[in-house]
Amino acid sequence: MAELFKYCPNCGSENHEFINSHRFECKDCGFVYYHNMAAAVMVIIERNGKYLFTIRNNEPAKGKLDFPGGFVDPGETAAEAVVRELKEELDLDLNIDDLQLIDTEANDYLFKNIPYRTLDVIFKITLDHDVVLKKEDSEIQDVMWLSKDEIDLDKIGFRSMKKVVEKHVLK
């Protein structure tokens, strides 16, 4: 985390430190920046005993299994972010009232050499109808429906998601 800033964004000084790995403090001008957790969402989508997984097309964890989701934009709720992300990534329309909030997990997300800490908010929805998915190629390599027996934890990209799968899918 010490490499997040080389110079103070306020005065340009190199005389600064990171405290508790998230608080940047300039010793010359007193500028303080908190590198707090970012909010992210994922959704477990179940249909006929199978779970929808995507294969990531970008780092971090490119080529690994993921649940659909993404970051929460300013001004939106976590549930609104799920609905938006599913529309953007898979052209899937979900009813926000059908989403069930089931868990939260802390995660690390290294993006372009900047370490983000995320708070992943996990939702679940069970579909009772077939859906046609149109993946966003820049985000997703592939989509697949997997039964519990077909899920390989070693192919999952993020620590938080492995915990979610263990607690809420493989239980």
Image (cartoon, rainbow, N blue to C red):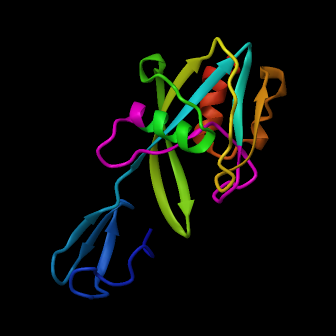
Total marks placed:
0
In the rendered view, does 155 fall on the left or right side of 15? right
Question: What span is in magenta?
Answer: 55-80
On whether residue 162 falls in the magenta region, the answer is: no
Q: Which residue occupies the extreme left position in the image?
A: 29
Q: Residue at x 84, y 27 (%)?
A: 150
Q: 163 and 15: which one is in front?
A: 163
Q: Residue at x 39, y 83 (%)?
A: 6
Where residue 81 appears, as percent x and y from the top left, is 43, 38
Where residue 146 appears, as percent x and y from the top left, is 78, 27
Q: Residue at x 26, y 66 (%)?
A: 33
The quarter of the picture where residue 152 lies is top right
Q: Quadrant of the N terminus?
A: bottom left
Q: Quadrant of the C terminus?
A: top right
In the rendered view, does 68 fall on the left or right side of 73? right
**Magenta part, dominant SS:** loop
- Up the image or down, 139 lies above or below 98; here it is below
Q: 122 and 22: which one is in front?
A: 122
Where residue 40 appears, as percent x and y from the top left, is 46, 43
Q: Which residue occupies the extreme right position in the image?
A: 150
- Up the image or down, 10 lies above or below 157; here it is below
On whether residue 67 falls in the magenta region, the answer is: yes
Q: Residue at x 54, y 22 (%)?
A: 124
Q: 139 and 25: which one is in front?
A: 139
The quarter of the picture where residue 4 lies is bottom left
- Up the image or down, 129 lies above or below 25; here it is above
